[in-house]
Amino acid sequence: MGNNNIRGGLLRKSHPIVYEILFAACVAVANLIVLFIVYDGRHNLELPRSPIQTLSIVVIAMMVFVSIWRNYIYNRMHHEYEDRHERKEHGRVTFMQQLFPYWYRISCGLMFLGNCMLPMQILFSSTLLDPTTGDPYQFNIVCALCFGFVFTMIGLNILTDTSIFIAQKVFGWTTLYQQLHVSLSSRRWCHFRAPLVFLVSAKIVLGGALIAKEDPIVVQVTVPISHLPDSLENFRIIQLSDVHIGVTIGRTRVKKVVDIVNDLCSGSDDNCNLIALTGDIVDGEPHGLMKAIEPLGNLCPGRDVPKLFVPGNHEHIHFIADQVVTVLSEIGIDSLVNDNIRLHRDETRENQLVVVGFDDLSSRRYRGKEQQAFDGIDAEKDITILLAHQPNHLKVAERYGVDLMLSGHTHAGQFYPGNILAWLFNSRFSGYYPSRGKTAVYVSAGTLFWGPPVRFSTRHHEITDIRLVRSQ
């Protein structure tokens, strides 16, 4: 592409934030194209069905994606490189000006690897883990970290431009920025911004990777319920959510989670009464991930502890919800999909606690099935616990008089800018929300993580130990 085309046209006259919006839109469209292509057989779309054709189109989509990234950087941050030789002749080339082209090349490489993650996870979900160890390949980890890096860098680009725009247009700092020669359209700002965004993104991803590598912590939560009977006092629930067995989570991590839960349940006088798995447990074709799923069958061995699972959006994204239900039932974990079950702690079977399970909001099976899930429940007398993957079920929970809703889905944002998006698009973000009327809510930060093995500026991944007590 010639310099005349780069420097001219509508985009040259547009505000730099336009570039950020267009680039983010291209990212979304490119990945949506990949998703539709690999789902063509399942959706019965009139698209190529051959694996070779499908893989070829995915590769082309990634090449287009990298091309968009290159041109984005060239337009936004490559001003100095155009006349580098001219500046060199006059002895005005700084170290940063000479180094700048490498930022763009490194970024292109990371973008390519990062964009491999989604098609890899979907196309090859049955072979994501080493068949010998049941753990992810190192290539999976590298691609996922690159995906996290690119996602973070996009967020930081938008943040920096938006901040300067607000300072100039809202607070009237235009004159100051002109004096400093760092306005959005200036070469000095673009030249400074490239390594700044790159280094901050690297700091977030690498620092977050060290945190994600740690074991989940145990978070203890006490939930007061006004009409809780004596027989259900200190009823204990262990919640697991968003394990995401798949591209970056394998047998070793799952087994460690099971060991922590079993330590919590080992006390003879303080047994666990329910293990709740609130969705996004499996993130790929389950039969190909069995070696990593199998340790879940050892949760509280030798104890008659109910283990209940509800599907999350990722079970439905892969169209594997029914397969996951079958696989988990084979290892002793029951599923509760738009249904309810009664649990008790004494031989009289009085004062039973009712557990309701919802399918995920993304499932067609959920629509219109709320009444079915609450059949036979008296909200005034029964203690009702709702297991629902997304906290956006809250309005339905309040309508039916649920005492406590357990959810996940948000990951507490996991890392920037995901924390902003999770906060914006969910009715509850993370942690315990006391009842404002009838329903209290606990949203898990996730037992492990999705995709990039990164946790930064959010709550630590967790195993939640919940106790029900009578409120004073």
Image (tube, rainbow, N blue to C red):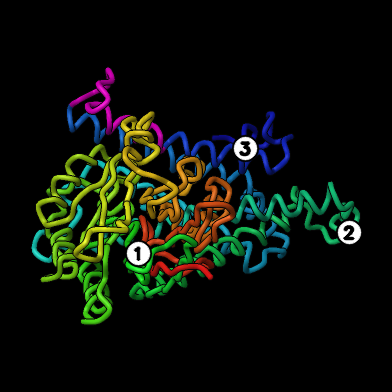
Residue at 81% over, 54% down? 167
397 relative to 277, above or below:
above
Mark 3 crowdedness (10 Å alpha carbons): few <14, some 14-19, many ≥20: few
Locate the N terminus and report the quarter of the image it occupies: top right
Mark 2 crowdedness (10 Å alpha carbons): few <14, some 14-19, many ≥20: few
Instruction: Report the mark closest to the observer, 3 or 2.
Output: 2
Q: Nearer the viewer, residue 423 or 185?
A: 423
Check if residue 190 falls in the magenta segment. no
Q: Identify the residue under disc 3.
A: 3
CB within 8 Å, label 2 to label 1: no
Q: Main secondary structure of the magenta part?
A: helix
- Give me the C-alpha separation between circle 3 and circle 1: 50 Å
Q: Identify the residue under disc 2.
A: 176
In the rendering, at what x and y percent does residue 239 appear? 33, 63
Q: Upstream in the sequence, badge 2 or badge 1? A: 2
- Give me the C-alpha separation between circle 3 and circle 2: 31 Å
In the rendering, at what x and y percent does residue 333 appear? 17, 55
Q: Quadrant of residue 24?
A: top right
Q: Which mark is residue 447?
A: 1
Q: Amino acid at mark 2?
A: Leu
76 relative to 8, above or below:
below
* Boundaries of the magenta span: 31-49
Instruction: Report the mark closest to the observer, 2 or 1.
Output: 1
- Dot 1: element: loop
In the rendering, at what x and y percent does residue 340 appear? 28, 45
